[in-house]
Image: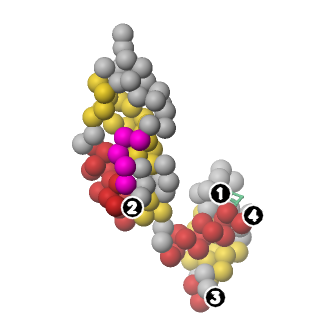
Amino acid sequence: MTNLICITCPKGCHLCVDEQNDYAVTGNSCPRGAEYGRNELLHPVRVITSTVRITGAMIPRLPVKTDRPLPKEKMFDCMQLINQITVQAPVQVGQILAANILGTDVNLVAAKTLPVYP
Ligand code: SF4
């Protein structure tokens, strides 16, 4: 048995995952918790939120996120990639800044619209 706290929503249900019983999950208040508990033990994933450098905008950093969760073991390499990115204003929210990160089929997208300044 493995105890986890579900991070899918702010309720934070305390989950119990039974590895000996096909990763059955108890303690969840909704189906998303069961999916999270099972995935967390079998193939954990995370959405990454961060910032990248931007030139020509009113602020020097652009908030970014991955458009889907990517495998947890790729997070460090993904952050190294993000730290090397510089974009030029203007940028639209949702714009793809890096496609198919590390061959995962996950894209890095802008989380904010930043026009050219001034
Ligand atoms: S199990 Fe459902 S209600 Fe509970 S924290 Fe997870 S997503 Fe939220």
Residue 37 place in picture, x, y as percent: 60, 70
Secondary-structure class at tag 3? helix
Quadrant of picture, ligand 1: bottom right
Magenta stretch contains residue 49:
no
Say left or right for 10 vs 72. right
Q: How far, Cα to Cα, is label 1 from label 3?
A: 23 Å
**CB at mark 1 closer than 8 A to ligand 1?**
yes
Q: How far, Cα to Cα, is label 2 from label 4?
A: 31 Å
**CB at mark 4 closer than 8 A to ligand 1?**
yes
Residue 32 place in picture, x, y as percent: 67, 63
Q: Residue at x 35, y 24 (%)?
A: 89
Q: How far, Cα to Cα, is label 3 from label 4?
A: 19 Å
Q: How far, Cα to Cα, is label 1 from label 2?
A: 28 Å
- Indicate the amino acid at tag 4: Ser
Task: Say which of marks 4 and 1 sits in front.
Answer: 4
Sequence-first tag of 1 and 3? 1
Sequence-first tag of 4 and 1? 1
**Residue tagged 3:** 21
**CB at mark 2 closer than 8 A to ligand 1?**
no
- Magenta residues span 96-100
Q: How many labels does the image show?
A: 4
> For the C terminus, which image quadrant?
top left
Sequence-first tag of 1 and 2? 1
Task: Say which of marks 1 and 2 sits in front.
Answer: 2
Say if 96 sits above or below 71 in the image.
Answer: above
Q: Which of 8 and 89 is in front in this view?
A: 89
Secondary-structure class at tag 4? loop
Residue 104 disc label: 2
